[in-house]
Image (tube, rainbow, N blue to C red):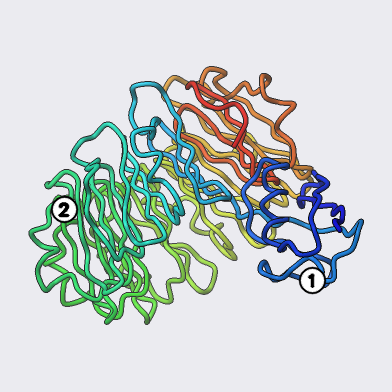
Amino acid sequence: MSVSLEVALISGKRATVEAGLAETVETVAQRAQLRLGVGKDHLVDAAGSLDPLASIQRAGLQDGSSLTLHVRPVQVQASRHSFAAILGDSSVLAWGTPGAGGGDCSAVQDRLKNVQQIQASERAFAALLGDGTIVTWGTWHECCDFELNITGVIAIASNRAAYAAIRSDGSVETWGFMECGGSTLLTTGPELQNVAHIQSSDLAFAAILADGTVVTWGQPSEGGDSRMVQDQLKNVQQIQGNRSAFAAIRSDGSVVTWGRADVGGDSSAVQEQLVNVQQIQAGDFAFAALLGDGTVVTWGGAEAGGNSSTVRDQLKNVMAIQASERSFAAIRSDGSVVTWGDADVGGDSSDVQEKLTNVQQIQATTFAFAALLGDGTVVTWGTDEAGNLRAFAAILADGSVVTWGDAEIGGDSSDVQDQLKNVQHIQCTPCSFVAVLRDQSLVTWGRFIGPREGP
């Protein structure tokens, strides 16, 4: 005897699946996955999750029962020119600008199964599999060793031209350009043991060890040499890196910095103000620290946001900070916005200040900002080097998308507008966009040739 079961996604898309009473819930999930064209996580009924190994009869399912298929969220990573997405079934879909690197993983596609994490360098990708091994692809051969033999990995970090993998025993393995941190000379020694987390600048790495100390490597001038502050790097909780410097928050809320002094590696001018720091946001050339009392302290390149003296009186009750390459935007508790940094690329929002009320979220491109308001409308400001708005994409309250700016790099989404519904997340390269929909399918547009809809 068989029954007909109605299986739906959270988006509302549904399919009817036939199953025998002796067949398992897992079998129903697999059939629904094929019918609906998505990956799967687990099936639930009105009472909650169902045991995937239980029979249809034991699970109490009857003819006409309604079930919901929960889909594992799609995760998207972007290199400078390409995208790579972990789909619901833990496989990978990669695409990008032809010849620009990373967009074609066909050479390793049969190995990209049960993928847990993807990290991108400028022109390559590295995928961490469920068995702790790594698969790489792209055009920078120093970052793409198809015979890479690393096991027991639990996390991957990357900078512009190198990778670092943390093993389950806390040791680290690196690959890529030697001068950017891809050298294994340090990582095979005793210094990098019991590693808990790794952060990167453009050309260097900083690892927080289990005891709260820090080890750095890579380009010395880009933050790879922390010897001048090594005795201060204790009880470190978080590290943030910008293009050429690092800032570490210690457990007492104080901050230690190193790297290029002119972009934030030297915070001595504001050191006395850096107390009870909760969060640090990094632009390319400066840092902004949010303190426990809602005020903000900045340092680094003055014209790139390191000097916030002109808006210091306004930087109160700040809830969140967003950075572009050369400027910052802070959302205050009343939903208003304060900006500073390079006026030509987002640091001056005076032309739209009256519109910046009840702001819920701010997103930044390289040279500009877009603010999502509480009523679902969007306010933008900032220009690129040519004086024109670059491309933006905003998710509205109903899950639709509005795009504007340079049509060639994603500002015109008219070709895919009818597909842009129930959008949950948007990721971008400098020239293209990908939207993850509620049913975990993908829609892409901009300057590249790639899948218009998927998976």
Relative depth, front residue between 302 and 371: 371
Image position of 164 (left or right of 225)? right
Residue 122, placed above or below residue 119: above
User: Please, what is the three-letter code of the amino acid marked with disc 2?
Assistant: Gly
Give coordinates of residue 324: x percent, y percent: 45, 42
Residue 261 visible, this angle = no
Relative depth, front residue between 400 and 44: 44
Q: Earlier in the sequence, mark 2 or mark 1?
A: 1
| Residue 59: assigned label | 1
| Residue 218: assigned label | 2
Q: What is the secondary structure assignment of the residue under circle 2? A: strand
Residue 455 visible, this angle = yes
Q: Quadrant of residue 2?
A: bottom right
Q: Residues within 10 Å of mark 2 (few under 14, many from 20)?
A: many
| Residue under the image location 62 percent in, 48 percent down | 39
Relative depth, front residue between 80 and 370: 80
| Residue 26: assigned label | none
Q: Residues within 10 Å of mark 1 (few under 14, many from 20)?
A: some
User: Please, what is the three-letter code of the amino acid marked with disc 1?
Assistant: Ala
Q: What is the secondary structure assignment of the residue under circle 1? A: loop
Residue 364, placed above or below residue 63: above
Give coordinates of residue 395: x percent, y percent: 68, 40
Asked whether disc 2 touches disc 1, contact meaning CB atoms under 8 Å apart, the reply is: no
Q: Quadrant of residue 415?
A: top right
Give coordinates of residue 419: x percent, y percent: 71, 30
Give coordinates of residue 167: x percent, y percent: 28, 67
